[in-house]
Image: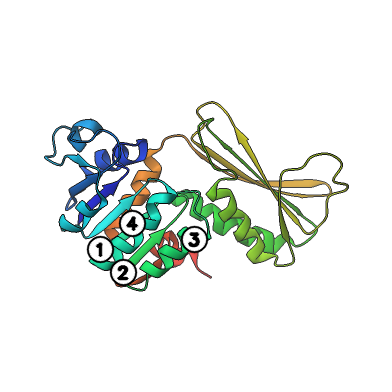
Amino acid sequence: MRYAVVGASGRMGRAIVRLGREMADATLVAAVSEQDIGQDAGLLAGVGSLGVKIVAPLEALTQAGADVVIDFSAPAVTLELAPLLANAGVRLVSGTTGLGDEHKGALANAATQVAVLWEPNMSMGVHVLGRLVEQAVRALGPAYDIEIVETHHRMKIDAPSGTAILLAQKAKSAREDTTYIYGREGKPGARKPSEIAVLAMRGGDVIGDHSVHLMALGERLELTHRATNRDVFAHGALRAAAWMATRGPGSYSLADVIGPVLRN
């Protein structure tokens, strides 16, 4: 697999370069970032020189001969990156969070020409959690209230997290007559049975905690995932990239990468 990284000087980008160095049959061919221009991506990631310097123009990605680009940058970059790679025939694995309808539309359009995988959380464990949430909500029924709480570090700019939204969607897929609410204040009144509440906490250096509470009279079930190291997201992105490197056009997810164990 020949791969490139967008956001290469960020925490996730450096982790991908570092862990990619340990993969057999994986070669970094380009690294793009708005910071640390001209530095060797391997030295910046702490694995020694790889002979790949960090550059700013996204156009460099189309000249590097990459099979797949891994992107952990910003939503604004997605709007430029997706059509650029689609026109060049380069596959995309994106873990960029905070995407709106316009950004997701750009990814969907690109998927008509190349393989595109977007996930707000690249942890394999999170996607197993999503499957468990869907099964639990369906099995327990409407007598159980659904509350989702996520906690992240103080520097995270979007709320609720993309993972919390993913878990809410999994819950709603099992109980369709529900609506989302985000936080509470004042006197909202008694909780409606149809609510799926998504609540965000911010502070310290928490990498990412997500808990789904299913609460009924007399008992409560809690399903929780805690990330204690960002490497789990980098490992997931690299595993996805290796899987995507030979895929044809279309929209893919980590469920496709993990396989039928997550399917009904």
User: Alpha carbon of mark 1 to alpha carbon of mark 3: how far?
Assistant: 21 Å
* Quarter holding residue 158: top right
Q: Residue 244: in sight, yes or no? A: no
Q: Is residue 253 left or right of residue 176?
A: left
Q: Which residue is mark 3?
A: 102
Question: Of tags 4 and 1, which is closer to the observer?
Answer: 4
Q: Residue at x 34, y 46 (%)?
A: 235
Q: Is residue 82 or residue 198 the one in the foreground? A: 82
Q: Residue at x 49, y 53 (%)?
A: 99
User: Alpha carbon of mark 3 to alpha carbon of mark 4: how far?
Assistant: 13 Å
Q: Position of residue 214 (x, y in %)?
A: 71, 50
User: Alpha carbon of mark 4 to alpha carbon of mark 1: how far?
Assistant: 10 Å
Question: Of tags 4 and 2, which is closer to the observer?
Answer: 4
Q: Is residue 203 or residue 98 the one in the foreground? A: 98
Q: Which residue is mark 2?
A: 114
Q: Amino acid at mark 4?
A: Leu
Circles 4 and 1: CB atoms closer than 8 Å: no
Q: Residue furthest top?
A: 204
Circles 1 and 2: CB atoms closer than 8 Å: yes
Which of the marked residues, 3 or 4, is nearer the chain's N terminus? 4
Q: Which residue is mark 1?
A: 90
Q: Position of residue 4 (x, y in %)?
A: 24, 51
Q: Residue at x 47, y 51 (%)?
A: 120
Which of the marked residues, 1 or 2, is nearer the chain's N terminus? 1
Q: Amino acid at mark 2?
A: Val
Q: Amino acid at mark 3?
A: Glu
Question: Of tags 1 and 3, which is closer to the observer?
Answer: 3
